[in-house]
Structure formats: structure tokens, C-alpha cells
Image: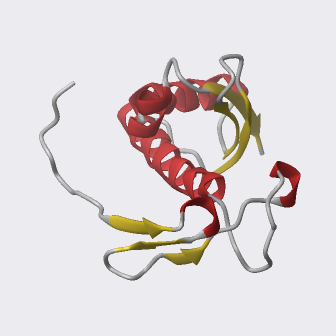
Amino acid sequence: MAIETLFTAHATSTGGRNGHSEADDGLISVDLSVPKAMGGPGKPNTTTPEHLFAAGYAACLGGAIDFQAHQLKLKPSSLTVKPAVSIGKADDGGFGLAVAMDVEVGGLSEEDAKKIVEAGHAFCPYSKAVKGNVDVTLNVKTV
């Protein structure tokens, strides 16, 4: 799929999962460590690629849901996206990801909340990027 580029983010990572990653603008600069649960050192004050992906996906999906709510003329009073990104052994012998996306929507009926979340998920570039490769479960809760 070709795109008309509107913005390009740049980052540098050294040392892989036990290294350092940073954005070219310096606003993101994190040390990484493989968690103990995956056999790594689990160093304190470090993060993982899964945390970074979760934060980016949450922001992207939240923006897409907000945009679709506006298109559908629905106005939630609040919107919170809380992803849980899991990494584990895949059937093919490698590793894979799974995402459980908990979305809390305020001020709408359950039906309308599900409508804007599903529309946002269909519109979100991150959701499109992982479609068919990552199991994504949407859990919608009205608050």
C-alpha cells in the first residue's frame, strides 16, 4: 500500500533488547532490558520494546477512535486506551505478539461505544499494520 507521507519519525537503537533506543528529537531516550520472565537480566529503570509499542499503539488508536467518533457525530465524555502487549513463543518456533486493548468510553451507550471503537480500530494505522499478524482483542467498557 502506497502512502502520501505526512510525517516521518526517526529513531536509533543500539544493543538490541539489552541496549538503548532514542528518537532523533531526544524526547524519547530509554534503556532497554530483557525481562527476567524471558530469561534476561531485568535491569531496574529499563523498559522493553513491548512497552514502547503499547504506548504508541494506545495513542494512535485513541486518536483514531476520537476521529471516528467525530465523523459519526458521537461525543464521548472520556476515552482511555489501555493496551496489554504480550510477547511469547509462536507456533512457527519464533516469537509473536498479542494485544488485549481495553478501551474505556464515557458518556455513550455500550452500543455507541463499541461502534466508535470498532470504527477507530478499522481506521488506525497501527491496527492496519498488525492486521493478520498480531491477535488484537478489543474490550470495550462504558464508564
Q: Nearer the viewer, residue 7 or 35?
A: 35
Q: Nearer the viewer, residue 100 or 40?
A: 40
Q: Is 26 situated left or right of 32 in this image? A: left
- Residue at 73 percent across and 60 percent down: it is 34
Q: Is 120 situated left or right of 58 in this image? A: left
- Residue at 49 percent across and 40 percent down: it is 65
User: Visible in this render: residue 72?
Assistant: no
User: Visible in this render: residue 132?
Assistant: yes
Q: Residue furthest left?
A: 4
Q: Quadrant of residue 136?
A: top right
- Residue at 70 percent across and 67 percent down: it is 33
| Placement of the N terminus among the 4 image quadrants | top left
Horizontal and vertical percent for residue 87? 71, 40
Colour scheme shown: secondary structure
Horizontal and vertical percent for residue 22? 44, 74
Q: Is 81 situated left or right of 86 in this image? A: left
Q: How many marks?
A: 0
Q: Is 80 situated left or right of 7 in this image? A: right
- Residue at 78 percent across and 74 percent down: it is 43
Horizontal and vertical percent for residue 106? 68, 46
**In the rendered image of this protein, does residue 30 appear above or below residue 56?**
below
Q: Nearer the viewer, residue 77 or 100?
A: 100
**In the rendered image of this protein, does residue 139 appear above or below residue 57?**
above
| Placement of the C terminus among the 4 image quadrants | top right
**In the rendered image of this protein, does residue 65 appear above or below residue 121?**
below
